[in-house]
Image: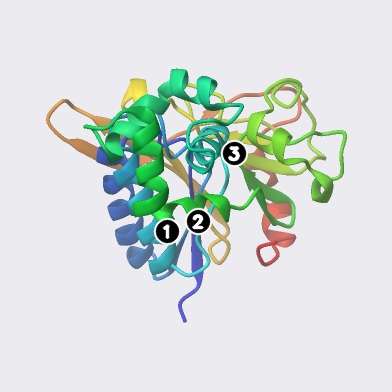
Amino acid sequence: MKDPIYYAIADVHGRHDHLVKMIEFIEADARYWGGRPVVYFLGDIVDRGTASRQCLELVHETLAKHEGSRLHLGNHDAWFLDAVRSGGRGDEVYSWQHNGGTMTAHSFFPGLNLKDALLAIQADYPHLVKMIADAHPMTSHGRIVFCHAGVDRFTPIDEQEIDVLTWIRSPFLEIANATDHVVVHGHTIFENGPVVTDNRISLDTGCFRTNRLSAVRIDPKRRTMDFIVSSDSGSMVEVDEANPRLLQRAFGTAMDRLDEIFDNWTEAR
């Protein structure tokens, strides 16, 4: 079997047009480098964009097609799951509905009201509901971890709580050092990203409003880390490698820690 090349994609938010081009690029890219793609979706597949159902179907296909690929739970995915499972009666349904949830329901059943659409999703798309229910909170490869929002730097990495992994911003974003795990995440938008600091790689570039979907490629065999960004010219979506924005905070950046990352690389946990 070919060696894995890992690709992490953050915050799709219903932009199927960008996601399908990104997956096509990733599959061709892995072939070019002589590896096989392992795709980590870092959550928030749904809401805000107009094609959440199509995005979920593509994620489902990708997980089945590329061994080792994983969906990581995002806060919007958790909202959607709660809405579907409760038939629209969950505690968080109002928040979900007013943060792009209605668009998600309409991507499944545009002619139904919200409650009927949620019941129909539960009945007609159990494979997608199960996929979200089975989503990973976090994946660790030694000194680098992947999750939706970030981690609590004051808690051991293997004791992180799901609410932190799907919701945290401060103080995770502000803490600077070169000793903590490098965290690859989304959730917080950096429109001019991706952004690389000393201990995090921030991939959410707000595709639903910026037309830029970002990913990182990590190749343990070649010991390289590179970035991939989609763009929308108005007539087509294009995908290519791009330089990240390096944010210096007195400790260098994660790009300076590649030897540490690859020397300590482990199987997914």
Q: Is residue 94 left or right of residue 151?
A: left
* Residue position for label 3: 148
Q: Above or below — where is 246 with respect to 60?
A: above
Q: What residue is pinned by disc 1? A: 127
Identify the residue shown where x is 56% and y is 24%. 188
Marks 1 and 3, the one that precedes in the sequence:
1
* Residue 145, horizontal then vertical, whole percent: 68, 48
Which residue sits at x=69%, y=24%?
173
Mark yes or no: residue 108 visible: yes
Residue extending furthest toward the left = 235
Cα distance between the residues tagged 1 and 2: 5 Å
User: What residue is at 67 percent from the left and 23 percent from the top?
Assistant: 169
Mark 2 — residue?
130
What's under tag 2, amino acid-wise?
Lys
Three-letter amino acid code at the position of disc 3: His
- Kindly give the residue lying farthest to the bottom in the view shown: 1
Residue at image point 87% right, 33% down: 154
Figure check: 63 above or below 200: below
Residue 129: percent from left, percent from top: 47, 51
Sequence-wise, the earlier of marks 2 and 3 is: 2
Q: Residue furthest top?
A: 98
Tags 2 and 3 touching, CB below 8 Å: no
Q: Secondary structure at mark 1?
A: helix
Q: Which numbered circle lies on residue 168?
A: none
Q: How is the structure coloured here? A: rainbow
Residue 212 visible within the image: no
Q: Secondary structure at mark 3?
A: loop
Closer to the observer: label 2 or label 3?
A: 2
The amino acid pointed to by label 1 is His
User: How far, Cα to Cα, is label 1 from label 3?
Assistant: 21 Å
Q: Residues within 10 Å of mark 3 (few under 14, many from 20)?
A: many
